[in-house]
Image (cartoon, rainbow, N blue to C red):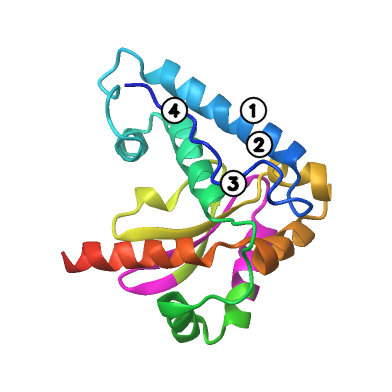
Amino acid sequence: MAFELPDLPYERDALAPLISARTLDFHHGKHHKGYVDKLNKAVDGTELAGKSLEDVIRATSASGDMSVFNNAAQAWNHAFYWRSMAPDGGGAPRGAVAKLIDRDFGSFAAFKTAFANAGATQFGSGWAWLVAKNGKLEVRQTANAETPLTEAGVTPLLTMDVWEHAYYLDYQNKRPDYIAAFLDELVDWDFVDANLTAAAEATAG
């Protein structure tokens, strides 16, 4: 069964003017679709065909098959990124994730600084992440297609794409402005909280 490009969880213009419909036309409709199409071509007729996207990522990361890994991981990272945002997002988190952010970073302001720094200092292309590891929240950065999925015991909660194609049409070289818009007005904290709950249930089970 072939991998499919997931629909955006909102209309293409729903994040405008922070992220324009034109950016999403290229980012989702060209870049993300390209990763999915290349992945399907790469796994067709191999033992990876029919496996879940997560299993393909972990298997190819372990084997060093970067030609498949890069497309699989980018397909997964992008799908997670779309769900990390919402038209009415941003602001301070609520619920369990808010308490853990205060516990593990000292304050929401300190978390924002750490997350923004991870995105701003990622040299070249990559991602900024909020993850849970052993019950504690951490900010991570990964280069290119790398993803926290490859590390045992780590659960991704939130990601921000800092490849230039994620923001260049709207912000040009002003990556910090894009990061500020993401944190202040786009983060879907309900999605983050749902990921945290799922991680806790998986650990308890």
Would you say the residues marked 3 and 4 are in contact, meaning their CB atoms lie under 8 Å apart? no
Please state which amino acid type lies under the numbered disc 4: Glu
Kindly identify the amino acid type of the residue bearing the numbered disc 3.
Tyr
Q: Disc 4, disc 2: CB below 8 Å?
A: no
* Residue that mark 4 sits on: 4
Q: Give the range drawn in magenta.
A: 113-137
Disc 1, disc 3: CB below 8 Å? Answer: no
Q: What element carries label 3?
A: loop
CA separation in Å, label 1 and label 3: 17 Å
Q: Mark 2 points at which residue?
A: 27
Q: In the visual, does 90 lie left or right of 80?
A: right
Residue located at (36% from left, 35% from top) = 53
Q: Say what amino acid the circle numbered 1 marks.
A: Lys
First reached walking from the N terminus: tag 4 or tag 1: 4
Q: Distance between the residues labelled 3 and 2?
A: 14 Å
- Picture quarter containing residue 178? bottom right
Task: Give coordinates of residue 33: x percent, y percent.
Answer: 56, 27
Q: Which of marks 3 and 2 is nearer the N terminus?
A: 3
Q: Which residue lies furthest to the top in this view?
A: 45
In magenta stretch: residue 114: yes
> Is residue 202 shown left or right of residue 142?
left
Packing grade of label 3 (10 A; few <14, some 14-19, many >=20) is few
Per the image, the residue denoted by label 1 is 30
